[in-house]
């Protein structure tokens, strides 16, 4: 309705039914209103399903916010799937791209508050579904860190940083291993100058198959 504030469509159905609109053309809804809810889709009782049921590669479901943010919020108290991302094909990946522009802020950040419960900030459950063959490797977490040849010698590149706070009267442990392992820590494929550096300046390095150097200050 030109110039109108509200357009209501009330089909007056007396029983639950399905209202279907079909077209062979592209269907586009557009609003030029400059408001936070310029276009709103809401179900006041049930869920909302969005399907691309017969789509091919490149015929994707795109959600793009140009100049603003995308918020996905769920209030359901569901332990495993309050917000769920599924890539069901065996060769598919859930890929998070933080952009190709050089980052000046954290690429991904998780803020978790705990209230008197046993909670994992990140929980990874990796199971082998088919027996592994020779030389096949499964990593629960794989971090690939690559610097530049021109990096300043005084810079630091850390594959993983854990920052603790002992304000808690409980025991704070940086790395805790539980369960059964054949090897607790494997450095056999690492080309390290120093294998282990302790906070008092002591270092441990295996310089050859027969030599293990333990250095503190000027003492070896």
Image (cartoon, rainbow, N blue to C red):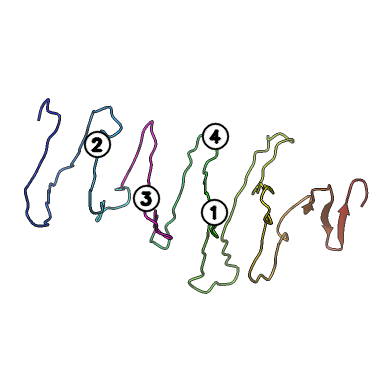
Q: Closer to the camera: disc 4 or disc 1? A: 1
Say which of 114 and 125 sits in front: 114
Relative side of 137 to 155, left or right: left
Q: Dot 1 lies on which element?
A: loop
Screen quadrant of the N terminus: top left
> Which comes before the other along the chain, label 4 or label 1?
4
Relative side of 43 to 15, left or right: right
Rendered location of residue 121, percent (x, y): 54, 54
Label 3 – label 2 distance at C-alpha: 20 Å
> Which comes before the other along the chain, label 4 or label 3?
3
Say which of 111 and 197 sits in front: 111
Label 2 – label 1 distance at C-alpha: 35 Å
Q: Dot 2 lies on which element?
A: loop
Label 4 – label 1 distance at C-alpha: 27 Å
Marking on residue 121? 1
Disc 4 + disc 3, Cβ < 8 Å: no
> Which comes before the other along the chain, label 3 or label 1?
3
Q: Dot 4 lies on which element?
A: loop
Label 3 – label 1 distance at C-alpha: 18 Å
Q: Dot 3 lies on which element?
A: loop
Label 3 neighbour load within 10 Å: few <14, some 14-19, many 20+: few
Rendered location of residue 112, percent (x, y): 52, 49
> Which comes before the other along the chain, label 2 or label 1?
2
């Amino acid at each position: 309705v030109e110039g109108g504030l509200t357009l209501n469509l009330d089909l007056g159905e007396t029983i639950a039914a399905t209202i279907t609109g079909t077209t062979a053309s592209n269907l586009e809804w557009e609003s030029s209103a400059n408001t936070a809810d310029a276009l709103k889709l809401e179900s006041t009782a049930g869920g909302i399903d969005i399907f691309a049921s017969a789509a091919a590669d490149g015929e994707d479901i795109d959600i793009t916010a140009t100049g603003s943010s995308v918020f996905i919020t769920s209030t359901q108290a569901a332990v495993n799937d309050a917000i769920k991302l599924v890539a069901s094909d065996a060769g598919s990946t859930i890929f998070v791209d933080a952009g190709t522009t050089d980052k000046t802020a954290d690429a991904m950040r998780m803020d978790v508050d705990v209230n008197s419960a046993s909670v994992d900030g990140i929980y990874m459950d990796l199971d082998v579904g088919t027996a592994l063959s020779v030389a096949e490797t499964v990593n629960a977490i794989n971090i690939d860190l690559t610097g530049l040849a021109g990096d300043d010698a005084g810079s630091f590149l850390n594959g993983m940083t854990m920052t603790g706070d002992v304000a808690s009267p409980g025991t704070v442990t940086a790395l805790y291993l539980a369960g059964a392992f054949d090897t607790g820590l494997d450095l056999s494929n690492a080309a390290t100058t120093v294998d282990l550096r302790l906070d008092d300046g002591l270092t441990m390095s295996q310089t050859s198959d027969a030599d293990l150097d333990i250095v503190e200050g000027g003492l070896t």
